[in-house]
Image (cartoon, grey):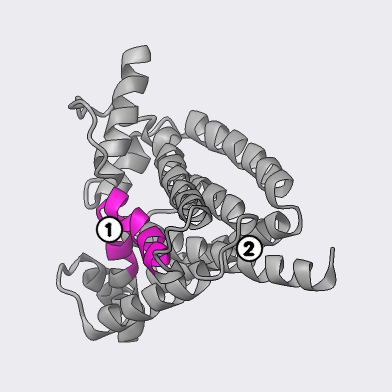
Amino acid sequence: MAGRLWNSFKIAFTMYSRIPVPEAQWTEENTSYTMCFFPFIGAVIGAVTWGLFLLKEYLLGRGFVFGDFFFTVLMVLVPIFITGGIHLDGFMDTQDALGSWQPKEKRLEILKDSHAGSFAVLSCGVYLLAYIGVYSALTAYSVRVTALSFLLSRTLSGLSVLCFPQAREEGKSLTASFSAHAAKNTGRAVLGIYLVLLCFIIIEAGRYAGVSVILAAGLMYGYYYRMCIKKFGGMTGDLAGYFLQMCELFMAAAAVVTDVFVKGFGL
């Protein structure tokens, strides 16, 4: 059992990040708990993001002024560097499919197309600009909640893999294969525990901002489910990547906006 868990851990980091780990044995048994370790990648991203913010504050306090924009861009790039852009790729593919206004079958074909269309490029540019705008307003208070949000987005994304109907049959996509071979009851239970713990931790860390982050994640998750079923007949790996990217942007925006209003009203 320990060996299976260790291999699932390595597979999660190999598949969803560029963090070097020992080579894993890719068998059906070893992939069964992969989703249980998916949020751990979010923990790494959150720690690096928070660390960069603290580094900026530390250097500023000692007279080393790099400018807020420099560190803002670095923090925006952290998830892309650590994941290799796998989720951003899914976001772009999904934007191409949604922007095509084609029938469901055609949208699924567009998701599989490795070429980026105009909707993907434009959406990616707008997304990154929005992220830079949000991150430029991060404070020592809101950055804590934002760092934790990377775990929450991956917990919800993992639950969607284990709970949502698949748009493609087993064997026709890696996500469908993961879902088919997963120890679903165990994975749902573990991710459910993560979800409850994260909600308490985020509220404790951010108070009003924490509540708004959880609400933003919940609303995005509801939209994600409805969009998957209505537009694609189920979820795919690309759609999971789309959700993760959008969820993280909306959670960061919720933390920043709430922090501004809380300070403005003196709460």
- Nearer to us in this view, 121 or 82: 82
The quarter of the picture where residue 93 lies is bottom left
- Tell me: 241 left or right of 172: right
User: What type is the residue that disc 2 sits on?
Assistant: Ala
Q: What element carries label 2?
A: helix
Q: Count residues near mark 2 (Cα–Cα under 10 Å), then give few for <14, some for 14-19, many for 20+.
A: many
Label located before the other in sequence (2 or 1): 1
- Residue shown at 23% from the left, 73% from the top: 110
The quarter of the picture where residue 118 lies is bottom left
Q: Position of residue 77 (x, y in %)?
A: 33, 60
- Residue shown at 26% from the left, 76% from the top: 106
Q: Mark 1 — residue?
A: 85
Q: Count residues near mark 1 (Cα–Cα under 10 Å), then give few for <14, some for 14-19, many for 20+.
A: some
Q: How many marks?
A: 2
- Residue shown at 59% from the left, 59% from the top: 217
Vertical relation: 43 (above or below) 75:
above
Which SS type dominates the magenta stretch? Answer: helix
Magenta span includes 90: yes
Vertical relation: 11 (above or below) 65:
above
Magenta span includes 84: yes
- Which quadrant would the N terminus be assigned to in this image? top left
Q: Mark 2 — residue?
A: 255
Q: Position of residue 147 (x, y in %)?
A: 52, 50
Q: Is mark 1 on a helix, strand or loop?
A: loop
Q: Where is residue 101 in the image (x, y as percent from the top left)?
A: 34, 86
Residue range (magenta): 70-91
- Between the C-alphas of marks 2 and 1, the distance is 24 Å
